[in-house]
Amino acid sequence: MFYEPSKGHGLPHDPSKAIVAPRPIGWISTIDGEGKVNLAPYSFFNALSTRPFIVWFSSEGEKDTAAIAAQTGEFVANLVSRELAEKMNRTAVDAPRGVSEFGYAGLTMAPSRLVAPPRVAEAPAALECKVTEILRPRALDGSETGAVVVAGEVVGVHIDDDFLRGGLFDIVKAGNVGRLGYMDYASVNEIFSMRRPRWGRD
């Protein structure tokens, strides 16, 4: 089949998120000016560069997390392991602003070192970030899409030593969780390696 997104797909459910998958989950924690903590998962999340280390998350509409990050200039991206998947899903609840998703999901807050928002103590890794840019993507016709993209430079990295093996982060042990389409998720349970080809050396 072929379809133009602007004209609809004719399927029971939108396939776009299933095609662009798996997507890392940015489990973003923030704290507002009154000290209220927010924790929410974002499946539009990834890294932009390593030098400097910059990550981003996109909110479809200016939800609490994006608004707080824009106001305070800080957020923490926590890694979702397979063991934390159900608790991560609980933090997606549409709770009123000011309700701590940490408590609702039975998670522990741990202090960050260089930013104010706490991190998820149970997460195998967490990235302390300072906001570098807020983007508001536009459609082809120039209209605003409603999406808010928050980019941040990673200023501190926490890694649980239990997930380090031979100096490498053990992704399989962590079972990094990715978002698929519809109601589906995936976790890493296998790794295979391929070396990048070099012209004239193959």
Image (cartoon, helix red, strand yellow):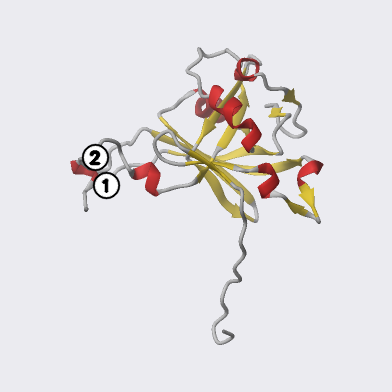
Q: Tell me which residue sits at (24%, 40%) in the image.
A: 11
- Which residue of the protein is positioned furthest toward the front in this rendering? 189
State the residue position of label 1. Answer: 140
Q: Residue at x 73, y 41 (%)?
A: 156
Can residue 32 be seen? Answer: no
Residue pictured at 30% horizontal, 43% vertical? 139
User: Residue 191 location, x and y as percent?
Assistant: 62, 57
As drawn, the residue found furthest toward the bottom would be 200
Nearest to the observer: residue 93 or residue 61: 93
Residue at 58% across / 45% down in the picture?
55
Name the secondary structure under disc 1: loop
Q: Which amino acid does label 1 sit on?
A: Leu
Amino acid type at image mark 2: Leu
Q: In which quarter of the image is the C terminus?
A: bottom right
The answer to whether residue 50 is left or right of residue 89 is right
Q: Which of marks 2 and 1 is nearer the N terminus?
A: 2
* Image coords of residue 131 (percent x, y): 59, 37
**Picture layout, residue 99 above or below residue 126:** above
- Side of 145 relative to 177 (left or right): left
Disc on res. 11: 2
87 versus 141 height, above or below = above
Percent position of residue 105, x then y: 62, 19
Structural crowding at the residue carrying mark 1, measured as other residues with C-alpha within 10 Å and reported as few (<14), some (14–19) or many (≥20): few
Mark 2: give few (<14), some (14-19) or many (20+) Cα within 10 Å: few
Of the numbered discs in the image, which one, if any, rests on residue 157? none
